[in-house]
């Protein structure tokens, strides 16, 4: 194996694979019905804005 074989693989099939993975992640994040999950995650810092969190023992 030499550098040129790895370079050819990275420039062709790995590029295609990583592009498909990226598109899959974007589509998964923007899927229908995921707004509630994202809104809930976005509100985590503000959950205890009115009063301190309860102490767990």
Image (tube, helix red, strand yellow):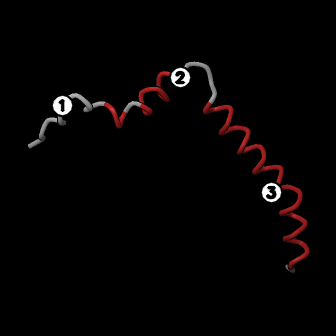
- 57 vs 39, left or right, is left
Q: What element carries label 1?
A: loop
Which disc number belongs to residue 51?
Answer: 1
Q: Mark 2 points at which residue?
A: 35
SS at badge 3: helix
| Residue drawn at x 84%, y 71% as measured from the top left | 6
Label 3 vs label 1: CA separation?
A: 50 Å
Q: Could you say where residue 57 lies in the image, as x and y percent from the top left? A: 8, 43
Residue for badge 3: 14
Residue 36 % position (x, y):
48, 22
The answer for how far apart the CA atoms under marks 1 and 2 are is 27 Å
In this view, the residue in front, 40 or 8, is: 40
Of the numbered discs 1 and 2, the one sitting upstream in the chain is 2
Sequence-first disc among 2 and 3:
3
Crowd rating for badge 3 (residues with CA inside 10 Å; few <14, some 14–19, many 20+)? some
Q: Single out the residue that lies furthest toward the left.
A: 57
């Amino acid at each position: 194996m030499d550098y040129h074989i790895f370079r050819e693989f990275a420039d062709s099939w790995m590029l295609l694979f990583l592009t498909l993975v990226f598109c899959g992640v974007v589509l998964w994040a923007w899927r229908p019905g995921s707004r509630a999950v994202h809104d809930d995650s976005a509100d985590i810092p503000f959950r205890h804005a009115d009063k301190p969190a309860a102490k767990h023992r």
